[in-house]
């Protein structure tokens, strides 16, 4: 099942399918290691849902919810 990264729940794991954002934001996300086929786990969400803390490629990363909405993932488990 595919969804955007911001729709995943804490503890869920997924695999990045694609980034729908273009331009400088896409480049920044790729440079942070948000690459197609990378596995990602949602570690926690701030009280209002922004930012999200992820575990990706062995390190923790926090990204804004608006950026997470541009990342399509395939959910691996619930």
Image: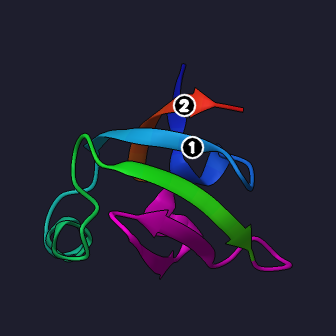
Please check the rendered image and state whether residue 53 is part of the magenta-colored stretch, yes or no. Answer: yes
Residue drawn at the location 29% of the way across and 48% of the way down: 38
Residue 69: tell me if it is visible: no
Residue 25 in sight: yes
Quadrant for residue 29, please give it: bottom left
The magenta segment: 46-69
Image marks 2 and 1: residues in contact by CB distance under 8 Å: yes
For the residues marked 2 and 1, what is the alpha-carbon distance in whole angstroms?
Answer: 6 Å
Give whichever of discs 2 and 1 has the lower sequence position.
1
Q: Is residue 73 left or right of residue 33?
A: right
Q: Does residue 44 show up magenta in the picture?
A: no
User: Does 42 appear above or below 17?
Assistant: below
Label 2 neighbour load within 10 Å: few <14, some 14-19, many 20+: many
Q: Which mark is residue 54?
A: none
Nearer the observer, 24 or 58: 58
What secondary structure is found at the residue carrying circle 1? strand
Q: Which part of the image, by quadrant, shows the C terminus?
A: top right
Does dot 2 land on a helix, a strand or a loop? Answer: strand
Residue 36 against residue 6 in the figure, above or below: above
Residue in front for this viewpoint, 66 or 73: 73
Q: Residue at x 18, y 58 (%)?
A: 22
Residue 62, above or below 3 = below
Image coordinates of residue 37 in percent, x first then y, are 25, 40
Q: Residue at x 63, y 30 (%)?
A: 77
Q: Which residue is mark 1?
A: 13
Residue 68, given in percent of the width and then of the height, sits at 49, 60
Q: Which mark is residue 75?
A: 2
Q: Quadrant of the N terminus?
A: top right
């Amino acid at each position: 099942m595919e969804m955007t990264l911001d729709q995943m729940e804490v503890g869920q794991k997924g695999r990045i399918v694609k980034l729908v954002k273009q331009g400088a934001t896409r480049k920044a996300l790729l440079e942070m290691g948000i690459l197609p086929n990378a596995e990602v786990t949602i570690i926690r969400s701030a009280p209002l849902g922004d930012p999200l803390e992820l575990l990706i490629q062995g390190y923790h990363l926090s990204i804004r919810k608006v950026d997470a909405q541009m990342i399509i993932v395939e959910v691996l488990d619930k």
